[in-house]
Every structure is written in C-alpha cells, then in structure tokens.
Amino acid sequence: MNSKPEMTVAQAGAKIMKAYDAEHIFTVAGNPLNLLYHAKHDEGIDIVLGRSERSALAMADAYARMTGKPTFGFVQWGPGAAALPAVFAEATWGRSPFICLTGSVVSGTRHLFQYQEIEQLPMMATSTKWSGVLPNPDRIADIMRTAIRASISGNPGPAYLEMPADMYAKKLTKTPDFHADADLAYVNHRRISASPNDIEKIVSHLSGSANPVFVFGGGTVQSSAFDEAAALVKALGIPVVTSVAGKGIVAETDPLAAGVGGRYSRKVANEVLGMSDLVIAVGTRLSAMGTLNYQYPRPGTKIIHIDIDPMSMGNTYVEELAIQADAKLALAALGDAADQAGLSRGNWSDWSSTVESMISEWKEKYRKAAETKTADGRLNPIFVMSQLDKFVQGDDVMVADTGNMTRWAGTMIDQKQAGLCNLRAAGSLGWSFPAAFGAKVAVGQNRRVLSLNGDGGMGYHIGEIETGLRLDLPVISLVLNNAGFAGYTGLLKNNLGFDPKPTPELSEFVDLDFGQIAKGYGAHGERVEDPGEVEPALRRAVSSGKPAIIDFAVSGNVSAPGMGMQREL
C-alpha cells in the first residue's frame, strides 16, 4: 500500500458512498463543502439541493424508503444539524435506511464560543439507530461502514456521522479499504428464515381456526413479500387486513382485501379483525395505530406474530407464537407447508364469503357517501377521493401526509396492484410535499408520483416547488383545502366535547389558492371548485409536464374516515 496517499477525508467519504451505489446526495449546501464537491466531481454522485434542511432530507428519507438503498444526506453544522432530530424521528418511524453527515466547529476553536457552535451529538442519540463522531482521518471508511451497517440491518433506520469541519480536508496516512459490505448494500440482503417447526405450528393453528385473518404490516412491503403474500391468500382464501405501512402488499382489488385496519382505517377492516379467532400478524408491531389502541384484534384473540425485530413481539398482546423471521421467507415457507398439509380455500369458504359480503357493503356505503352534497357548498372530499381512486393507476406512487391525509389515502384509494406504491408521513406534518420529489427521483420519469396534502401541511415546505422545477420533477401535488386544521376542529368536538366555534385561533386559516401560488413559481396550478372539474384537472396536470399543484376547495365539515375518530366509514 502507498504509505503517503494524497487523499483527504472528504475524498474517501465520497468513495465509500459510491461503493454503496450512491447516485444522489441530498443537501442544503453549507460548510464544509469538500464532501459535496468530491461526491459530484470525483464519483459522479448527483447533488439534490433543497430549500431547507427538513425538506431536503425528507426527500432523502422518501428516496431511501422507495429504493431500499443506504441513502446519504449532508447539512451544515449548528443550525443545519439542529434540524436533524425531527428528520431522524420521521425516518425512524418510517424505517428508512438514511445516513446524514455533518460538520462541527473546527477542532482548534471548539468550546471557545465559535459561531454556530452547539453540542450536536447528544441531540441525535434518541432518534437514530447509530450516531457517532469520526475519531481520526484514517477511520473514515470503517466508521462510515459502521453507520451504514446500523442503518440498513434488521429494522432499518437513520444514522448520523459528525466530523469537525477541518477534518474533511485532512490527509489520510494510509489508503483505506473501500469495500462495501455485500450483505448490507440494500435492505433485506440478509434474511432470517423461520424454523420448520415454527411453520408446522402455524399450520396446526390454522387447521383448527374457523375465522383466520392475515394482518400484513410495513415489514412485508419492505421485505418485498408481494408474490408470497398473493400466492398464500389465493391458495387459502383467508382475508387480509393491513396496517397503513402494509398497504400494497396485496392488490386491494382482491375481494378478500378488507383494507387498512386500526386507527386510520376502514370500518370494515376492524370489523373483520373483531370477528377473527386467529390472527397471523406479519411484519407489524401491532402498535396503537395499527390496532386502534389495542382493540383490534380483540384482546384474547389467538395471535401468531412474525417479525424481523424480536423487540416488537409480545409488547402489545399476549401471543400464542412469536417468530423472528424475514416476512418473505416466512410466507413462502408457510405457503409450502399449508399446501403439503392439504389446506385450501375450501377450509374457510363460509368465512371468506361473509367477509366478501362485508367488503362489498362497505364499498356501497363509500359510493353513497361520495354522492352526498355538502351543507356549505364546497367539494365533498369523499367525492374527490372517489375520483382520485379512478385516476390512480397500478404503479403510481401516492405520498400522503400525516393525519387526515393518510386517513383519506389509506382508506379511500385502492392500490390496484401489489407493490411499493404507497408512502406516508409517519408523524411529521408537511413531510409529504417535499418527500414526493424524493420519491420521484427514486422512480424516474416513467412512473407518476402524487402527493396528498392538506392546506395546513402545505404551509411547511411550499418553496420546494422551485426544486421540482429546477430538477424537472413533475410531481402532482393535491391539496384538500378546507382553509384550516379541520382535524383539530374534529378533535375538539368529538374527542373533547368542546364547541370549536369560540376558538378559531386553533384551526382556521385564510383560504389561500395554492394553485395560484404554484403559477407564481412557474409551475402548473389550478383551483377546483366544481365537481365536474376534478377529473379534467388531474388530466391537465399530467399533460402540463411540470410540477403541479391542484387545490381542491373541500368542505371542512366532512371528516376523514378512521374508526374511533370522527367518521366511521
């Protein structure tokens, strides 16, 4: 080896990124700039520049979720780093393999009241899987591998690496090893199989069950268990309920797909869960969100739980059987074992017929609700969603904001084919608008990307419409505009029993036209107030070939679905 390599930490860091197949680095440029320069000019890694740290890294988060690749971001020390805990919290909730690097003040002036100095590392520990500081220049390659390994393995999540600003320009004293861990280059490269004995136990429990239900969570989607899940449902005829994150593991046009259950749910999905005597929960934590505060499945229901993370097992329910395994491998093994045991659709034909009828009845209620006129004359958001359901194609990507937007998209828009087509903000309002641009970077020009936002969430990152224009990312952003935080109005009225009218300060906004705002940037924009213009407006947005915002003037008096909240549809 060359004992005096002419290589800096920044150059070496860029090479490690490239070794892990990095094609993009997401950033709001700030000091030090060495890493970004070498990533672009030495390694051919494209720079995706956002208008704020939170929005740029929301793009990185969405890109990581869509690709399953370790994805890199960079922000300046001080105020840039201070934005990261919120970014990391969302990436943790969304199980995103995202690694962010920052600088910190130069070593020689640390603790001397340097401009923008702040203790950054303690802020990151609670919201990342791994966080650390580069101890010396020659450790750059192995420390970056450590951060990537932590981020990508098991349940993916964010990692953080900090380096003093002067460290980026320091020369290495020896040539590092630039290899990438072959088994950790993508999510799911390292899979754990269920034991044959555990699979046999599941088959035994199935054989004795009258009303079994599969509950598929985000872990099944992240495992790419689409073919295995579809084959199992087809062979056995067992109904399927998903979590919000599990949406898309099977096509929701399947007559046994009851839809999303839990808090942001279709009422029918929870009703099916409530009638089950055996739940096989795969790739889900059975969280408060996914179970409507642990009500569905009903306490006492026999539960078999399969997940990659043993820490998710037995936390919220008493479980008959808990199995640590990869979802794709476990479902494949279960399908084979069920076939060998002679299990088939005939075992549960009465149960499946009952569920199919329940789902059909729910869809008829949906149709009638969409036709209802609103008292204030604004658009019925259920009607808007029914038109979106017709417009969205099989491989379109829908990125929904947290709260009501996840409830609308999760329950009202059927995913027509199995696949990773559904992203949602796992808790950060405003995330979906910039995240959709990151998803578009991931999927390219041949797949359409739409985001679903409220007018409240749009206020966070509206400047990213310029990013979409600059980078030629024709995302269609849909705004359900009720001129306020209608969700809070519902919480006051339905959850607390308060009259919301005396406190408009909590929820009411000026009725802005976001279509006009888009036009001001040079993007496509329009406002829709006539029900007959919903579908034509969507077609015009596609034809524009530009980033687009369609502002739907909807009524705030029509609540989003979600059992246990404001509407039980």
Image (tube, rainbow, N blue to C red):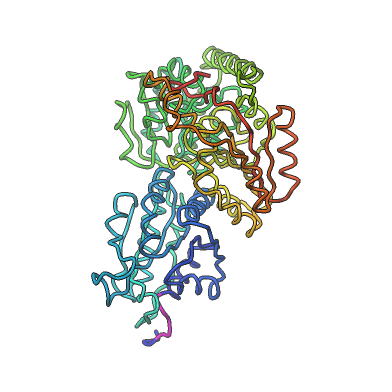
Q: Which image quarter: residue 483?
A: top right
Residue 230 appearing in the image: no
Q: Nearer the viewer, residue 119 or 101?
A: 119
Q: Residue at x 32, y 56 (%)?
A: 130
Residue 55 in sight: yes
Q: Position of residue 387 (x, y in %)?
A: 68, 29
Count of numbered tags: 0
Percent position (x, y) of residue 163?
34, 69
- In percent of the image, x 63 and y 47: which residue is there? 517
Q: Which segment did they paint magenta?
A: 5-9
Q: Is residue 6 magenta?
A: yes
Q: Quadrant of the N terminus?
A: bottom left
Chief SS of the magenta region: loop
In this rendering, the answer to whether 440 lies above or below 450 is below
| Residue lying at 40% horizontally and 17% vertically, measured from the top left | 277
Q: Residue furthest front?
A: 502
Indicate the position of residue 506 as horizontal and vertical percent values.
42, 32
